[in-house]
Amino acid sequence: MKGPAKQLMKFVCAAMASAMVCTAFVTLGGCTDPEGNGKEPPAVLQSHYLRDIYEDYFSVGAAVLSGNYARYDEAGLMAHFSSITAENEMKWRFLEPAEGDFSYEAADELVSWAEEHDTAVRGHCLVWYKSLPAWLAEKEMDREEALAVLDRHITEVMTHFGDSVYVWDVVNEALHNSVTAAQLASGDIWRTGQEASGDGCVDWYGLCGVDFIKEAFRTAARVRDELGLDVKLFYNDYSLNNPNKRMAAVKLVETLRADGIPIDGIGMQAHYRLPSYTADPEGFMKNFEDSVKTFTDLGLEVQITELDLCVYASNDTPQAFDALPLDVEIAQAEMYADLFSVCRKYADPKREGKGAVTNITTWGVADDHTWATNSAHREYPLIFARDYSEKRAYTEIIDF
Ligand code: GLA
């Protein structure tokens, strides 16, 4: 027996055993105060929770919005996760809405909730070209000023959160949207110009060149050292399963390392689409695994930081169904299972000189709230359904 059947059987057996023990206690006059008899329920009773099932592999997380996690908590869903990411509340525009004036209320609430629930917090994100406050997007800055603004923000935010955050996405999305072979060969891999423009955007590369990435990591490492923090420093981006973009990320790592600047890991966002997997499951998984292998071979940690699997082919595909069809749900579950399986394979930190996969985080908790739902269609990218029931994706990822 394997997978969910095994997990379920363990769960049922443990529940039965516990009920029998309890009946015996009651018969003997015990168990009158089930909360207060000083005994913890057997650990195996928790085994339907992802965080327990994956305990020996990596932490399992979800991104949450401050207005949402209370209701997921009430529904019992948050108990699955050993790590959470603020979907928005740690972005620059929330933390520093006016220059030098920091606003931590929503993020602090999340951190307190996490501490009370023995849940770790992924810090997302210190430097990004977008989701910036208006004062910053509109600020006239030269190179020196831009680097100084970055330094101040990183120093202040890391100091505030200290050890409450176990990993920071220091820089998010500094590479081209997609990287061509010619761009890779010529070194033209950095997001700039049109790709870094729009409301609330700053073209950091345009202002500072690659120094903005170096400075961000250098500053983050300095703060970590000065405060003695136990925090990992990550680069985070999307499409890192694409071979060219993967190698562009390797160049980024090499660029930092050449200057002795520390980087601990790569965040693979993993906003994927089901049709790109079903068209060629083996090819898709090979690209994904090649990236995980390449990064861990460099001695880096890998975290799958924003996993969601959209069932529609593109953002503007018109709505084709009002509820998730069974065959689509099954295919999505297979894709989830394959991704988790590769990650388990690279979770062992004992591989000499190599890094490991240390976290998988879904970008959201349940299909009732996802950034992927838009005016063209309702999306279904997560492992829990709109009514908070477990989808096949959930049953497949515990099936190993
Ligand atoms: C990017 C960012 C996330 C989030 C998602 C979806 O991947 O890193 O913070 O904004 O887009 O909205």
Image (cartoon, rainbow, N blue to C red):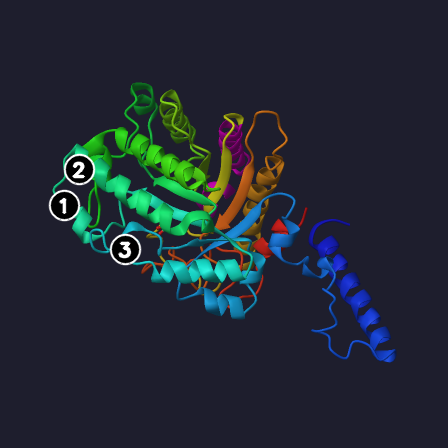
State the residue at coordinates (20%, 55%): 98
Query: In the rendered view, would you say 38 is above or below 226?
Result: below
Residue under circle 3?
102
The alpha-carbon separation of the residues under discs 3 and 2 comes to 19 Å
State the residue at coordinates (40%, 59%): 108
**Nearer-N-terminus badge (3/2):** 3
**Magenta range:** 271-296
**Nearer-N-terminus badge (3/1):** 3
Residue under circle 2?
145
Instruction: Verify CB contact (< 8 Å) between mark 3 and mark 1.
Output: no
Residue 228: image location, x then y, percent: 45, 40
Crowd band around label 1 with a 10 angstrom C-alpha radius: few (<14), some (14–19), many (20+):
few
State the residue at coordinates (55%, 50%): 60
Residue under circle 1?
139
- Residue 274 magenta-highlighted: yes
Helix, strand or loop at label 3? It is loop
The alpha-carbon separation of the residues under discs 3 and 1 comes to 17 Å
- Which of 96/275 is in front? 96
Helix, strand or loop at label 2? It is helix
